[in-house]
Amino acid sequence: MRKYLGVALAAIVLSAPAAWAHPGHGPMEPGLGHWATSPYHLTFTALFGLACVFASRVVSSPRVRRACAIVGGCVLAVAFLAANGRA
């Protein structure tokens, strides 16, 4: 299982440019309201949180592992709360 975490992490990180790829506006143009209601942005926010959680599984330093797990969990929680049952 552990050997696939690196592959999954790389796939998520490499897909990050697609978070900016939905047409119609610049990266920070429409504001936080658009981010919180857009399934595109929420999906990639959740994927970033998941990448942080995966990173916490493969990093050897306990401090970095803990930081990645906390950040990943918080980002996932924010994405799911912003989705507000739309998923």
Image (tube, rainbow, N blue to C red):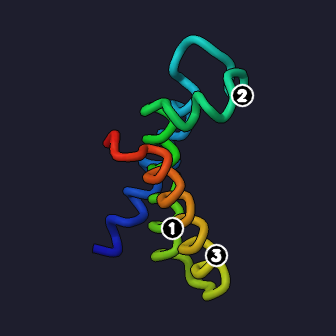
Depth check: give the residue in front, 14 or 50: 50
Q: Residue at x 38, y 66 (%)?
A: 5
Q: Residues within 10 Å of mark 1 (few under 14, many from 20)?
A: some
Q: Which residue is mark 1?
A: 73
Is mark 3 in CB contact (under 8 Å) with mark 1? Answer: no
Q: Residue at x 42, y 63 (%)?
A: 6
- Quarter containing the N terminus: bottom left
Q: Amino acid at mark 1?
A: Gly
Secondary structure, mark 1, is helix
Q: Amino acid at mark 2?
A: Met
**What separation in Å lies between label 3 and label 1 (alpha carbons)?**
10 Å
Q: Which residue is mark 2?
A: 28
Q: Amino acid at mark 3?
A: Ala
Q: Which mark, by number, is residue 67?
A: 3
Secondary structure, mark 3, is helix
Looking at the picture, how far across and down is residue 84, in whole percent? 41, 46
Left/right placement of residue 44 relative to residue 71 reads left
Left/right placement of residue 4 relative to residue 47 reads left
Q: Nearer the viewer, mark 3 or mark 1?
A: 1
Looking at the picture, how far across and down is residue 68, in whole percent? 59, 71
User: Which residue is situated farthest in the front direction here?
Assistant: 84
**What separation in Å lies between label 2 and label 3 (alpha carbons)?**
26 Å
Depth check: give the residue in front, 17 or 86: 86
Of the residues under marks 2 and 3, which one precedes in the sequence?
2
Looking at the picture, how far across and down is residue 34, in whole percent? 58, 28
